[in-house]
Image (spheres, rainbow, N blue to C red):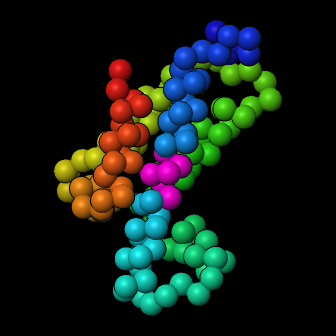
Amino acid sequence: MAFDDSSVAPEFEQLKALRSRLLQLHKALLDAEKDAYEQTHGPVRNRGEYFQLVVGHEWFSWLRPMSQFIVEMDEVLMAKEPQPVEAAQQLLQDARVLIKTSETGQILNQRYEALVQLDPHIAPLYQQTTALLTP
């Protein structure tokens, strides 16, 4: 089933709202990790250095799946050709898995869990993001 421009499927509207909120959560997580990085390694000198750290340094590697997911959302939402509603449905399902915190002991999940629970700016963004995904 193809996405019809004249009648926007609710899944695409939900995906647009999710993208906006996920961008805010992603930025807050990046900011928190930058602060932690700078406490350990000293100040990041400029945006170019920061960008290189985000895309290449192990410290920020746990955030890359979220970055890549946002790109996937953009590809569907900004495609020139109409996208099937199933594409939006799949992204919404993938988002539920992506942003879910876990106590499995995995280091990446532990960092995410700690920031969601402890950072007063991240916790409400996380709650708002997950609220958009509640069936």
**Image quadrant where residue 118 sits:** bottom left
Main secondary-structure element of the magenta-colored stretch: helix
Is residue 96 placed above or below 41 in the rendered structure? Answer: above
Q: Quadrant of the N terminus?
A: top right
Q: Is residue 97 left or right of residue 23?
A: left
Visible residue check, residue 119: yes
Is residue 129 placed above or below 117 in the rendered structure? Answer: above
Visible residue check, residue 52: no
Which residue is at the front of the view, 23 or 92?
23
Q: Which residues are magenta?
A: 22-27
Q: How many marks?
A: 0
- Tell me the residue at 62%/46% (across/down): 71
- Tell me the residue at 60%/40% (across/down): 72
Question: Where is residue 15 drawn, in percent x and y?
Answer: 54, 30
**Image quadrant where residue 133 sits:** top left
Is residue 33 placed above or below 133 in the rendered structure? Answer: below
Question: Where is residue 64 drawn, in percent x and y?
Answer: 50, 57
- Tell me the residue at 36%/58% (across/down): 121
Q: Is residue 123 left or right of residue 51?
A: left
Check if residue 6 falls in the magenta segment. Answer: no
Question: Where is residue 34 drawn, in percent x and y?
Answer: 45, 74
